[in-house]
Every structure is written in structure tokens, then in C-alpha cells.
Image (cartoon, rainbow, N blue to C red):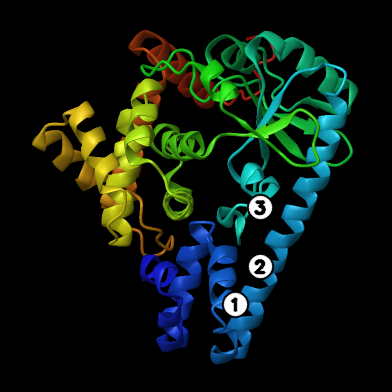
Amino acid sequence: MLEKILLQPSLSLQLSLAEWDHLISAARAGQLLARLAWLIRSHGLASGLPEQIADFLLAHEALADAQHEAVRIEANEIVHALSRSDSPVIFLKGSAYVLSNHPASQGRLLGDIDIMVPRARLEDVELMLKLGGWSNAHHSAYDQRYYRQWMHELPAMIHRTRGVVLDVHHTILPPTSRARVDAAKLFRDARPIDGLFNAYVLSESDSLIHCATHLFHEGEFEKGLRDLHDFHVLLGAAIERGLDEACFAERAIELDLAWPVYLALRYNQRIFNVSAAAEATRRLQKACSPSLLRLALMDSLYQRALPAQSPDTAGAATGFAQWLLFVRSHWLRMPPHLLTYHLSRKALTRLAGNTSEAHG
């Protein structure tokens, strides 16, 4: 139901209160309540809804608006803190949509702020941020080593007074991943943000590619439909602006990310029942050459895991599919020996009841 209403908001006028209860539960689980609210209001449908439903949705849209204003303020603080480092800063994902006034920002709830800086400037950037009031949220020795040695980002940082969480990346996938992304290419094509010094967002094609990569490598399927809908909106806006599908496909291949982009195009079509970017899909399918068996397996998992479901209706099969895809995401991000070590250590730590790992 939620997927249909995201595409055709007028269907919401036909829902009973019981159906609204299920829809709201699914939208909350998928972090799509504010986007649902924006769609209904922007289509002039709020007056046709039950008053309690309209008021509830309006409150969530107001929450998104407040988060967006906070992101704009925080972006200025980040840029100011890094002004002496002379490092370019690329804002990623939700904060990028907000700062560039992209349609994907409409009704987009945010958790933290993601930025990317060149790896060579990482130490300087971290120092400048600490001087500006941010500190590492992960304090265990093992977590510090895990992020700094193996991951594509620093341990999460949190501002001491404002409480804003900041993720500082130096690329978009861990260096241990099977895909090898040249982050310098992302910086080379980044677009400046008006009004912010030395601050950028990814190019239109790279933003689409990053959205797909995040969705199919991170394993966070509780908000998978939100990320897929982000891709849907990003793709629609790019096509309206004359997306060169051949160049888009070649860019995904160049960045060694053809497979996640192909999956995003495939499930954008299947989950939202739309046909878009057929030429790019054809080129990426040819580049990936997936077997029918592999596609059947992917379909059986993703078409169960991606649609948003309320916690009380999600069955064991959905949970198992999400777990398998979570394991897959780790398999893509780490070689077997490192993955075995990491998961074994985490499991032993939980069994021992020791989450501090102060001497790890």
C-alpha cells in the first residue's frame, strides 16, 4: 500500500482508519512518514483526510522542516570549523539533498550528517573538527582501530553541545570492499554549494550511484524503501533534466559500481512499477552479465526485504531475507578472513557482556 501511495497520493483518500493505522506503521518503520505527509500536502489532499490523520502527518512534515533548518545551520558550522584546513568538503545523502534544494529533500527525515573529505586531509580535518567541538562517539580501542584501519570513515563524531552526529568519510565504500572506488573521481566532478565556502555535493550521476551503492552495500533494510524512493526521486529529476543514460551507465562502470546501480534500476522498476532509464538498465545488465539463477535469488530476497512493513505484520520470511542481505552486505565490504575475525569478536563480546572493550 505504501509504495502505491508514494506514487499516487490521491489513493490515500480511499483509506479507512484501520488501513491508515497499517500505512502509518509501515511508513514509520521505513522512515517515510514525513515524505508521505509532504506528498499529501503538496497534492492538496490534506483537507480530504480525517482530521487526526492530517494533523499527525503535518507534525511529521514540520519535524522534517526543522531538521532541514538544523542541517543548514550545522553545515555552516562544519565549513567554518574546516576553513583553516583548506580541505574540500562534499556533503552526502540527505544533507546534500537539503543543501542543494533537491526534490529528494522534500519530506526527507535525517539522522546524522555525512561528509566526505580527501583521505590525505583526514587527520587535519579530524583535528579541526575536534577544535570546533566535535569528539569521537566510539571510545573502544577495537572500534577505533576497526574504523581507522578498515573502514571508509572515521568513528562517528558528535558535537559536545549541539549533540549533532557527524560521519566523516574519505570515500563511499570501505577500502576492503570488492568494489574499488577511486574517490578522486568523485571530488573531480563535484558541484559547489551556493553560499558555502569549499563545500560541494556529488554530481548528478555520482549522487545516483552513491544512493544505489549505499542501499545495496550497507544492509540497513529497515529504511530500504526510503533509500530506494530517494533513488526514484533522484532518477526522475535527472531524467527531467536530460540525463544521458549511456554516460550514466559508463560512469557506474568506471567507478566499479555497475552492479548496485543495476539493482537500483531493477528494483525501482519492480517495487514502484515504473519504467525508467531503460537504456542505462540495458547497458548495466550487459556489463554485469548476471545469470538467471542469481537474478532469481536477488529478486526473492530484495522484493521481500525492500517494501516497508509494520513490525506487527512483517513475517519470519521477511526477517530472514533481511538477515541474509545484512550478511551479504558484510561479505561485500570485507574479505572472508577479516569478516570472520570481526563478527567472531563482536559475538564473543556480546556473550561476555562486555561492550566497552577498553583494552581491546
Q: Earlier in the sequence, mark 1 or mark 2?
A: 1
Task: Residue at 76%, 59% (x, y): give it.
Answer: 66
Report the Cα–Cα distance between label 3 and label 1: 18 Å
Q: Is residue 142 above or below residue 186?
A: above
Image x and y of residue 242, in percent: 43, 49
Image x and y of residue 113, in percent: 68, 39
| Badge nearest the viewer, 3 or 2 | 3
Binning the other alpha carbons within 10 Å of mark 2 as few (below 14), some (14 to 19) or many (20 upward) gives many
| Badge nearest the viewer, 3 or 1 | 3
Residue that label 2 marks:
61
In the drawing, does residue 237 fall left or right of residue 355?
left
Residue that label 3 marks:
101
Q: Earlier in the sequence, mark 3 or mark 2?
A: 2
Extreme left residue here?
292
Give the structural element (helix, strand or loop) at label 2. helix
Q: Nearer the viewer, residue 160 or 66?
A: 66
Task: Residue at 40%, 81% (x, y): give it.
Answer: 11
Give the structural element (helix, strand or loop) at label 3. loop
- Which amino acid type corresponds to the residue marked 1 in the rendered image? Arg
Q: Earlier in the sequence, mark 3 or mark 1?
A: 1
**Residue 217 at least partly seen:** yes
Q: Nearer the viewer, residue 216 or 155?
A: 216
Q: Are marks 1 and 2 in contact (CB under 8 Å)?
A: yes
Residue that label 1 marks:
41
Task: Residue at 18%, 31% (x, y): give it.
Answer: 286
- Which amino acid type corresponds to the residue marked 2 in the rendered image? Glu
Give the structural element (helix, strand or loop) at label 1. helix
Image x and y of residue 35, in percent: 56, 64
Binning the other alpha carbons within 10 Å of mark 3 as few (below 14), some (14 to 19) or many (20 upward) gives few
Report the Cα–Cα distance between label 1 and label 2: 9 Å
Report the Cα–Cα distance between label 3 and label 2: 16 Å
**Residue 318 at least partly seen:** no
